[in-house]
Image: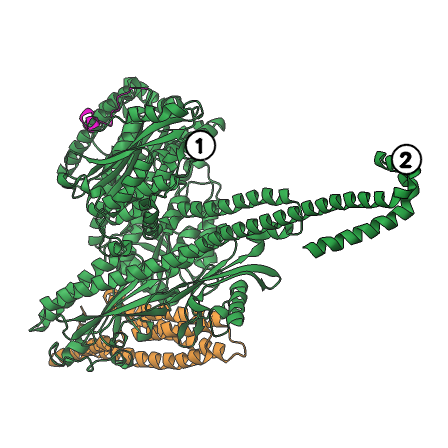
């Protein structure tokens, strides 16, 4: 440093000298100091040289100072920049890590559940096999197989993610269940039992080793006939006849070779039935502990959901994710390119370097090139600047070291996506900019992380995150225990967080047959201050505990607010319970007082309850459940199911938020957890007053929901805000309500003067009110085709009310499509709770307003009348019934008008149901077939259909157009239909089919005559594949022609597809039902009957 | 009369064997049930239609597979049609081969397709001769003045 300064000094000195020489004239005019020096020059030129040196020294010091300051600045800038980069890199790394961690965790949970299911199946099998250990005759052996089939089905049906379960017995017999993920069709597969049992008697003791049997016998034994029978995916009932299938169409059957030393094994397999790789596990079944192997159980699970999750993740964050085995075989990717390649002997796994996705391919090649055959230890790679093509990418890979299936996850993100701004500004020197941009970038990255969380919350698959989530929730245990936990303080919407949580748990609850309900009072503040993640963690732990111990009934999460400054008695909270608690209010005021002035927010006490109908907790343990934390390692707890593990964390967190939690006494079985939290809330956020908001709209709601608790809570709330409500828990109840609400008006037409006045009032009322009918999809009979008929019935009311559907997580697209096609556009996922209902009501109000503005009302009423007329014609019930109904109608109208009190309406409804059942009895007493559409046409029609199927000529007089090109099928179908009494016309292609309908359609009939002059056919049977114009096109054309009219001719598709994956396509183009070839006569008849309007002649 | 009974027994045995060997399935029984006084020759009629149709399809398939550039879509649609008609008369083994055939079609595996066509021809000829034999038996029963027994 010293020499450097010396050097600088010398340089400056000489520079100053030369500068002095050349610039001295002008310098004179300059500085004051120079003038002084000038004077000195004049007075004492002899001292000139000494002055020079003084001047130079001063100057040098100044320059040095300047340089020092400059250096300091540079250093500070450098370190800041380095620090900024490090912290940004850390954040970016965090984001990348989180992105990749999700799919890896998902994979992990799939592995876990597959092994669990396999173990369960083995245990069950062993139990059954040992029970029938020595079958003496064939009957007993068949019984064994029957029992095994039932047991296996139970397990298979309850795990929707499973692809297949197979059991291969020592004697070569195989039983298997298989689910085709493409259309959720389910099959039972088995081979020819007689071939094996006849050949060799079933004797478990014949040989203790398993050398006597091997896999080869199955596949090389051509004489073995394999059968596959379609099953109802829900009930497991056979829904079609078994078909023989060639052996190479089989699913993966686990064989003895997969359990070489009697040890379980697993590997990744492929199947032609799914385009995603499968995880396949195999385990032996022994006849006794340590005994010989009598069967092998195989379970396969699709890895489809992992890829799905990856796709969702990259939708929100650009980039690519893929997961491979250690050897590099692709297991799942975020791209839509295929994961399997076709070869002559079936699909095969694909290496990542062969992927059709260019980024994944180049990324994998890059990794291969960089590391060759020797990947870094643990496969952990974090490359910040990898050049793929023209872009820079981050490449990260993480290793999941599972004992039998090590996996590598790779994440490739364009660098510009995360660090774009940083790279851009790297050359800019201003420190301020850097620090400012650091904040900005930080914000961007944090918002990315947030987006990821939100993406998950909104996703359809979020339920499946549960396994991961609870795992994740347990990890911060160490932090909690060490007391180092710092709570975040940020505003969040408490209601939405909790509702999201309930959404998430609902699937799990549904599978456990438990109803989950959320009941938050209107006084809950919309926004609170606090640590949302930890709040969610509290409730996630409580709810998952409740689920664990509740096998039937319900779980309710209640929440309400207690304003510390008011002394309102809350209805939800009884006095004696409150006495158990130390007054939280005092605590609140104490806490609050010192910071009263500094803080704009006010603190509120939020009360919560998690109420379940589980096995309950012994009162002696009410305290200790929060303390017993014996299992240090969360993973062991996970294996053992865990007992109250989360409660320790929960109490710590609750206390940390200034609250308390305890178990309180409950009337009835189950556990009631009560807690309060002390959270800040912005002062002036006004509460919604729903009562005022909906007062003018004259809302009326029918709640037809399966879950009784959720329905009760919602109807209570609706009552509170003054909306009249009708409840129904099953289909028949709903039909009663609808008919009594809407159809009675038609009786008025045949009635005396006085009553038509009442009718007009009710009609008027109908016009100004917004009628909402909320229907649970579970009310429909989806296991048969009856649901279509049920929808037809609801169509009658479609113009007078708004339907809102509550769907399940597994509601198929075909059903959603069918609802959509019928104009049911409002759909929510279960569970239904207040905020979803508010959405529904607002949408309905909005729609009503729009239709009012467009003057649609008049037209609507007209159409109502039309429908009513039609019904009156068909009405054949006697007069006494009519008048009876009419009095009810009058009474009901009066009540609805005079008071919209919940209780009154409820009473009224009770009376109505009584009357209905009376009328049902009346109907049952009649000897001739009952044809009054008055009370329950749905039921009647079904009855009629059943009767008709049993009768011989059940299609008497039905006019059918058959569009089919193959002469054989033309003949067969025609004979079948004619035998049933139908009148059949045959056409050979789609064009002719359309023509056959067109004339009457284009006749330009006035609208009124439509009903009198119906189309020439009652139904079309349409082959899908035909020359000239195929069935899909023809259907589309017909539906287009029908547009704007009230006509809808039922079209039934005929296809030869073995898989029913085309069903969706059929429904999409507007067909109403679907039949596969060869035609099953009974099924065809029942389908036709369910679709044609039956107008039986009594 | 004994001759009729003999023929009838033979008929039943033969039909059973056809079912057991997988040549025919329930669908054929359904066709037999559809035959009555108003359609006395229904089964023969439909099956002859099937023979006509099949021979046309087999020819079409042979031609399609001999093309320089094989139009697998067209092949597939022929096989699809063949499968539909075969399963409609209950010619189960023919239908099974069609399933294989379609898989090869999907893979665009010419060799597999050609092999399948051979198999298809064989299976078709087999089922045709079996059905013809069955019809001859039927005729003999009718000529002897007997009733064709119903298969359950």
Where is residue B9? Give x, y as percent: 15, 78
Task: Report the side of A81 relative to A886 (left or right).
Answer: right
Near mark 1 (Cα within 10 A), the count class, few <14, some 14-19 or many ≥20, is some
Q: Is residue A596 above or below residue A815?
A: above
Chain letter, colour green:
A
Near mark 2 (Cα within 10 A), the count class, few <14, some 14-19 or many ≥20, is few
Q: Is residue A1009 above or below residue A241?
A: above
User: Is A571 inside the magenta-drawn segment?
Assistant: yes
Residue indicated by mark 1: A847
Residue at left offset 27%, top offset 51%: A784
Instruction: Give the distance between the C-alpha atoms of the residues marked 2 and 1, in whole angstroms.
Output: 96 Å
Q: Is residue A711 above or below residue A75?
A: above
Where is residue A810? Give x, y as percent: 33, 50
Which quadrant does the C terminus of chain A fall into?
Answer: top left
Q: Is residue A61 visible?
A: yes
Residue indicated by mark 2: A39
Q: Quadrant of residue A187?
A: bottom left
Q: Quadrant of residue A553?
A: top left
Where is residue A888? Give x, y as percent: 23, 24
Residue at left offset 27%, top offset 81%: A216
Upstream in the sequence, badge 2 or badge 1?
2
Relative depth, front residue between A800 and A582: A582
Q: Indicate the chain on which mark 2 is placed.
A: A
Task: Report the span colored magenta.
Answer: A566-580
Relative depth, front residue between A461 and B126: A461
């Amino acid at each position: 440093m010293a020499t450097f300064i010396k050097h600088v000094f010398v340089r400056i000195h000489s520079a100053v000298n030369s500068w002095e020489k050349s610039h001295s004239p002008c310098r004179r005019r300059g500085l004051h100091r120079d003038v002084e020096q000038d004077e000195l020059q004049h007075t004492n030129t002899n001292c000139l040289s000494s002055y020079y040196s003084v001047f130079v020294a001063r100057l040098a010091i100044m320059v040095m100072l300047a340089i020092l300051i400059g250096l300091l600045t540079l250093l500070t800038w450098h370190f800041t920049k380095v620090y900024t980069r490090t912290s940004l890199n850390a954040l970016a790394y965090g984001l990348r890590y989180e992105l990749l961690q999700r799919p890896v965790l998902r994979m992990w949970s799939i592995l876990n559940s597959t092994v669990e299911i396999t173990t369960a199946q083995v245990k069950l099998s062993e139990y059954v096999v040992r029970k029938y250990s020595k079958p003496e005759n064939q009957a007993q052996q068949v019984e064994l197989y029957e029992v095994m089939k039932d047991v296996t089905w139970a397990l298979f049906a309850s795990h929707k993610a499973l692809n297949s379960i197979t059991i291969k017995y020592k004697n070569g017999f195989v039983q298997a269940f298989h689910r085709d993920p493409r259309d959720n069709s389910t099959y039972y597969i088995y081979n020819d039992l007689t071939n094996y049992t006849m050949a060799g008697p079933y004797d478990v003791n014949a040989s203790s080793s398993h050398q006597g049997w091997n896999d080869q016998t199955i596949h090389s034994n051509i004489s073995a006939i394999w059968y596959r029978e379609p099953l109802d995916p829900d009930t497991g009932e056979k829904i079609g006849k078994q078909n023989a299938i060639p052996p190479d169409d089989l699913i993966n059957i686990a064989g003895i070779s997969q359990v070489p030393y009697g040890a379980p094994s697993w590997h990744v397999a492929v199947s032609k039935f799914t385009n995603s790789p499968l995880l396949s596990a195999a385990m032996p079944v022994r006849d006794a502990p340590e005994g010989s192997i009598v069967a092998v159980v195989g379970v396969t699970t699709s890895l489809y959901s992992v890829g799905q999750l990856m796709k969702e993740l990259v939708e929100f964050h650009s980039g690519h994710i893929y997961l491979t085995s250690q050897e590099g075989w692709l297991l799942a990717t975020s791209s839509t390119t295929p994961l399997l390649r076709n070869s002559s002997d079936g699909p095969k796994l694909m290496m990542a370097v062969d992927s059709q996705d260019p980024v994944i391919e180049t990324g994998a090649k890059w990794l291969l090139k960089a590391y060759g055959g020797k990947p870094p230890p643990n496969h952990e790679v974090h490359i910040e600047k990898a050049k793929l093509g023209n872009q820079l990418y981050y490449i990260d890979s993480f290793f999941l070291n599972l004992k039998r299936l090590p996996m590598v996850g790779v994440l490739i993100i364009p660098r510009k996506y995360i660090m774009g701004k940083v790279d851009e500004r790297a050359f800019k020197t201003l420190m301020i900019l850097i620090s400012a941009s650091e904040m900005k970038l930080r914000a961007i990255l944090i918002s990315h992380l947030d987006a990821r969380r939100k993406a998950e919350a909104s996703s359809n698959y979020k339920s499946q995150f549960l396994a991961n989530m609870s795992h994740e929730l347990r990890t911060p245990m160490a932090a909690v225990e060490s007391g180092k936990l710092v709570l975040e303080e940020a505003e969040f919407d408490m209601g939405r967080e909790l509702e999201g949580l309930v959404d998430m748990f609902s699937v799990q609850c549904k599978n456990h047959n438990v109803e989950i309900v959320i009941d938050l009072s209107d006084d809950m503040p919309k926004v609170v201050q606090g640590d949302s993640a930890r709040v969610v963690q509290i409730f996630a732990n409580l709810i998952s505990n409740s689920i664990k111990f509740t096998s039937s009934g319900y779980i309710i999460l209640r929440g309400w607010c207690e304003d510390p400054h008011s002394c309102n008695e809350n209805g939800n909270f009884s006095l004696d319970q409150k006495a158990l608690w130390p007054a939280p209010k005092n605590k609140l005021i104490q806490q609050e007082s010192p910071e009263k002035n500094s803080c704009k927010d006010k603190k509120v006490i939020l009360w919560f309850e998690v109420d379940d109908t589980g096995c309950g907790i012994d009162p002696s343990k009410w305290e200790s459940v929060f303390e017993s934390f014996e299992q240090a390692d969360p993973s062991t707890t996970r294996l053992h199911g865990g007992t109250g593990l989360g409660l320790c964390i929960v109490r710590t967190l609750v206390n940390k938020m200034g609250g308390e939690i305890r178990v309180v006494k409950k009337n009835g079985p189950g556990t009631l957890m009560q807690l309060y939290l002390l959270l800040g809330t912005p002062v002036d956020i006004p509460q919604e007053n729903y009562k005022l908001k909906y007062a003018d709209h004259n809302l009326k709601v029918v709640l037809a929901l399966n879950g009784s608790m959720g329905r009760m809570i919602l109807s209570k709330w609706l009552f509170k805000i003054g909306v009249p409500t009708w409840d129904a828990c099953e289909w028949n109840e709903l039909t009663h309500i609808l008919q009594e609400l809407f159809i009675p008006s038609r009786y008025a037409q045949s009635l005396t003067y006085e009553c038509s006045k009442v009718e007009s009032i009710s009609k008027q009322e109908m016009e100004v009110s917004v009628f909402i009918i909320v229907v649970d999809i579970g009310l429909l009979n989806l296991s048969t085709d009856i649901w279509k008929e049920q929808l037809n019935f609801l169509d009658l009311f479609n113009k007078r009310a708004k339907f809102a559907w509550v769907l399940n997580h597994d509601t198929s697209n075909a059903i959603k499509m069918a609802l959509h096609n019928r104009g049911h556009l409002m759909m929510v996922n279960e569970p239904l709770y207040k905020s979803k209902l508010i959405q529904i009501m607002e949408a309905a109000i909005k729609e009503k307003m729009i239709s009012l503005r467009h003057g649609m009302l008049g037209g609507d009423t007209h159409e109502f009348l039309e429908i009513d007329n039609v019904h009156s014609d068909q009405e054949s019930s006697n007069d006494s019934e009519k008048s009876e109904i009419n009095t009810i109608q009058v009474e009901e109208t009066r009540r609805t008008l005079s008071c919209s009190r919940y209780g009154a309406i409820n009473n009224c409804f009770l009376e109505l149901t009584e009357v209905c059942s009376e009328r049902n009895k009346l109907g049952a007493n009649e000897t001739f077939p009952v044809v009054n559409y008055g009370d329950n046409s749905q039921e009647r029609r079904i009855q009629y259909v059943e009767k008709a199927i049993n009768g011989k000529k059940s299609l008497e007089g039905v006019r059918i157009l058959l569009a089919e090109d193959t002469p054989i099928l033309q003949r067969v179908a025609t004979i079948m239909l004619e035998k049933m009494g139908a009148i059949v016309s045959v056409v050979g292609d789609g064009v002719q089919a359309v023509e056959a309908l067109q004339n009457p359609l284009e006749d330009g009939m006035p609208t009124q005559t439509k009903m009198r002059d119906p189309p020439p056919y009652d139904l079309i049977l349409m082959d899908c594949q035909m020359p000239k114009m195929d069935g899909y096109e023809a259907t589309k054309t017909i539906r287009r022609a029908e547009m704007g009219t009230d006509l809808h001719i039922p079209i039934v598709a005929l296809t030869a597809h073995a898989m029913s994956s085309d069903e969706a396509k059929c429904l999409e183009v507007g067909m109403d039902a679907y039949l596969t070839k060869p035609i099953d006569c009974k099924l065809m008849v029942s389908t036709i009957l369910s679709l044609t309007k039956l107008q039986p002649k009594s | 009369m004994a001759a009729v009974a003999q023929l009838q027994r033979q008929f039943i045995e033969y039909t059973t064997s056809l079912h057991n060997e997988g040549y025919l399935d329930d669908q054929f029984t359904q066709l037999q049930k559809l035959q009555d006084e108003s359609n006395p020759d229904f089964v023969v009629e439909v099956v002859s239609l099937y023979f006509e149709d099949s021979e046309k399809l087999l020819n079409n398939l042979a031609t399609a597979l001999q093309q320089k550039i094989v139009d697998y879509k067209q092949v597939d649609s022929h096989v699809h049609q063949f499968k539909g008609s075969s399963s409609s008369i209950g010619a189960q083994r023919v239908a099974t081969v069609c399933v294989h055939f379609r898989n090869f079609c999907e893979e665009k595996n010419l060799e597999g397709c050609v092999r399948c066509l051979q198999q298809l021809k064989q299976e078709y000829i087999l089922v045709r001769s079996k059905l013809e034999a069955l019809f001859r038996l039927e005729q003999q029963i009718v000529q002897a003045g007997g009733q064709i027994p119903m298969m359950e």
